[in-house]
Amino acid sequence: MRKVNCDTCYKGFAAVLLTALVLCSAQPAGAQSETSVGNPLPPKEIPVALKLKQGAKEDSTEMVAVHTRYTFTGKGSWFSASNWENERIPPAALKPGEQVIICGTGPCMYGQATPFILGKGSSLEVKAGKTLYLSIGGNFVLRGGTLTNHGELKVLSGTLTNQGAAAGSKIVNTGKVNSTKLSSIDANIEQAPATTGAIPQSKATSKQ
């Protein structure tokens, strides 16, 4: 029977154990966290969704005006999507930077029981040779916005009014603006060039 040298076995086992310890200590600390319970990602890694939220929070401190244009290209109802470029109908209240352009193949008819509001920094322009009819149960209101008419603007019912002159809202007319007996215009209208047609420049209710 062969006699086993215990010292040799012990030294061999110790060498294997030492090698294993060296390999474990050389492994990056972050790699262990991948298999840790409740921590599937390395400690310094942030989920993409969280990064996006953090970025949005930082950017939200700066208010940037929206620059959106709505162009009427058809004829008939304001509220028909097919009459608007890319079928995008303007909202009932324009925000800063939003623009409405009336440049259709025929007259545009705005008929609505609720007010339409030109908010601060927004604008509506009727191009030369184009027509915008307003038939409103309430008001077509300027609250800091600008209404520019180079064509024809006619108020059939309701009131076209300027409630935000102090905030910079105004009506500029180089075309024709008038109203019927069922409507009124209560606003300062800058007539350019100054003429005796349509609306007087002073603030007054006009029924023509």
Image (tube, rainbow, N blue to C red):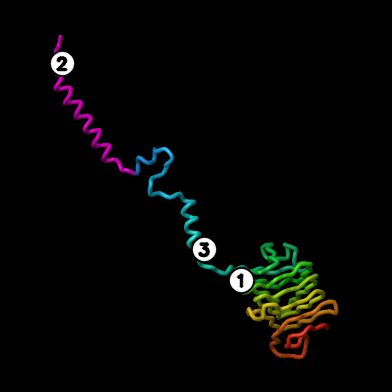
Q: Quadrant of residue 163?
A: bottom right
Labels 3 and 1: the sequence-earlier one: 3
Secondary structure state at the residue bearing disc 1: loop
Q: Badge 3 is on which residue?
A: 60
Residue type, numbered disc 3: Ser
Q: Badge 1 is on which residue?
A: 96
Q: Residues within 10 Å of mark 2 (few under 14, many from 20)?
A: few
Dot in front, 3 or 1: 3
Secondary structure state at the residue bearing disc 3: loop
Contact? badges 2 and 1 (CB < 8 Å): no
Q: Which mark is residue 154?
A: none
Q: Badge 2 is on which residue?
A: 4
Q: Which residues are magenta?
A: 1-29
Residue ranking furthest to the top: 1
Residue 139 locus on image (x, y percent): 76, 73
Residue type, numbered disc 1: Pro
Residue type, numbered disc 2: Val
